[in-house]
Amino acid sequence: MRILVVSTAVGPIGQGRGGGVEVTVYSLVRGLTDRGHQLTVLAPQDSEPCGCPMRTVAGQLQPPWQQQRRDAPVVQPPDGVLAAMWREAWTLQARHHVVLNLGYDWLPLWLGPCFTTPVLHLISMGSLSQAMDQAVADVANTHPGRLAFHGRSQMESFGIHHGAVVGNGFDLDTYRFVQEPEPLLGWVGRIAPEKGLEDAAAAATLLSMPLAVWGRVEDPAYKARVTADHPDCDFRWKGFLPPLQLRRELGRCAVLLMTPRWQEAFGNAVVEAMACGVPVVAYRRGGPRETVDHGLTGFLVEPGQVTELAAMVEKAYRLDRHNVRRRCRERFGVAPFAQRLEAWILAALHRDPARGAEP
């Protein structure tokens, strides 16, 4: 197939604004290209190459939904890149068998039925706003096969109980396995309130262990508040790193902490750590409760239970790191992810009334 992949409008690929979508783009391109498909990626200007032909579009970046109130209205910035990308997608659609949307926003969900080429949506986050919930529900009611999700709990946050769940994929050969880690805790994510960095800092303080923090600072005031509220935490601020550099550093950690205060759709950092052999202690919420094998690749604790979080770190430290990496390879490689994507796309085209009986 010829597939047009439309990335997120919140930031260029490679700069970290797009969060997990950026990891998904690389894995999706690698996996589907290996299966013989021809891909073109449409992304904001200044995006980095991702392994296939790319078209970039200039414009003002779209505000992320996770930074807005649940009752916030739809926002369309002047000269917005979201509208510009989908104007470009409209002009390119006839050259492709399918358009695959990775952006979590209202416009592609609303425009999709107007395209002559089917537009499929891999939803990257859970329920965050009334406007997005309605946009997802409209597609679920009219074209249910065009939606896919990274995890079941993410899908169910929209009130959808039967749909395509494709997980995610990672090029595991690019992750550096470390058998003997440093006495260091790790935390990866955007520095923003919904990610719950303060709980990781509290656990690290209880354990008297340094906490390495990798991620883009989206909310400087929040970072300052967490730092001030945990004066005894030995923060090791690492900033946002390009993917390959992060993969070389993550393995140094004894354990990764995952402490979201929202419903993570998948939690890429969990899998990235496990790919390096690093066990994970995470809140039993959203994607991590599906990606962490309790007692094998890490441990799950109830959200907000910082004392339990610290206690499970000591147990996780004793897990076999070879087993952690082996289990990760079994579940989250690029090849099985691409197979699941391909099966979903073909099924969606097959059932799409605009395409007839066959893809």
Image (tube, rainbow, N blue to C red):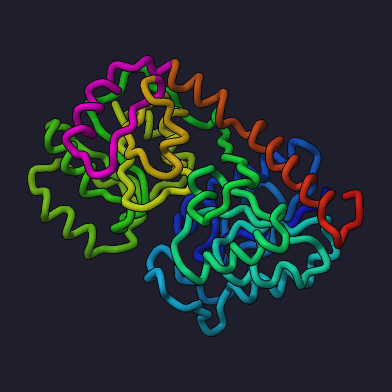
Q: Position of residue 158 (x, y in %)?
A: 52, 56
Q: Nearer the viewer, residue 298 or 317?
A: 298
Eyeballing the image, is 321 above or below 18?
above
Q: Residue at x 57, y 59 (%)?
A: 47
Eyeballing the image, is 130 above or below 24?
below
Look at the image and give the residue range highlighted in magenta: 296-322
Q: Which residue is drawn at 30% across and 43% down?
A: 259
Considering every residue shown, the one lying at the far left of the view is 232
Q: Residue at x 37, y 71 (%)?
A: 69
Q: Where is residue 91 in the image (x, y as percent from the top left)?
A: 79, 72
Q: Nearer the viewer, residue 324 or 174?
A: 324
Question: Based on the displayed image, in which of its 4 quarters is residue 141 positioned?
Answer: bottom right
Position of 255 with respect to 329 (left or right) is left
Position of 146 with respect to 96 (left or right) is left
Q: Position of residue 288 (x, y in %)?
A: 42, 38
Q: Is residue 135 magenta?
A: no
Q: Is residue 303 magenta?
A: yes
